[in-house]
Amino acid sequence: MKDYISVDYYRLPEYPDEEIYLKFPSYSKFVSRTFETKEEAVSEKYITDVVCYKCGRTLRKKIRWFLANQKVYLCLAVCPEHGPVKAKIRIKKAEDGSLYVVKTAKITDEEGVDKLLARREEARRKRVEKNKLKRAAKKALRS
Ligand SMILES: [Zn+2]
């Protein structure tokens, strides 16, 4: 891991060994190579793994990745030594239309955990709402 380097988003990594791992005092950042689809990106284990940036442990997840909105996945992992770690995956579009992932991880506190839980509830509520609308629309089409 390299410290304090800004990422050149104009030249994205093309291969896994060119992917970028950055470590800051209070969070870590990872920039992936490009993928065709978001599903392809998040099916890679190393993309969804959460590593504690203080001790390098691969962490156990307390709240599995959920879609907070179209482009953002969130999850909560826990380091046995450093406590709760909030991780975020942002799906970004490269200039050529392919997709890449920016993953950040940050040690958080109780307040951060509560916020994450609220985001998950919100996402769940929206999904339920959307499904209801879909069902209602289908029903209307049938009758
Ligand atoms: Zn740790």
Image: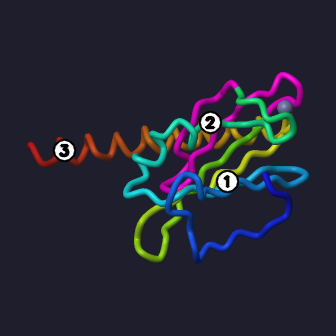
Residue 117, horizontal then vertical, whole percent? 68, 35
Disc 3: which residue: 138
Identify the residue at image location x=80%, y=27%. 79
Q: Amino acid at mark 1?
A: Phe
Marks 3/2: CA distance?
38 Å
* Residue 68 placement, left or right of 25: left
Determine the secondary structure under disc 2: loop
Q: Nearer the viewer, residue 116 or 95?
A: 95
Q: Residues within 10 Å of mark 1 (few under 14, many from 20)?
A: some
Residue denoted by label 1: 30
Residue 48 horizontal/vertical position (percent)? 57, 39
Q: Earlier in the sequence, mark 2 or mark 1?
A: 1
Q: Quadrant of ligand 1?
A: top right
Task: Specify start and end residues of the magenta stretch as a single range.
Answer: 60-84
Please report whichever mark, 3 or 2, sits nearer to the chain's N-terminal start: 2
Residue at image x 56%, y 63%? 13
How far separated are the C-alphas under marks 3 and 1? 42 Å
Image location (x, y in percent) of residue 100:
51, 60
Crowdedness near tag 3: few (<14), some (14–19) or many (≥20) residues, C-alpha within 10 Å: few
The image shows residue 33 at horizontal and vertical percentages of 52, 58
Label located before the other in sequence (3 or 1)? 1
Q: Which mark is residue 104?
A: none
Mark identifier at residue 49: 2
Its colouring scheme is: rainbow
| 135 relative to 33, above or below | above
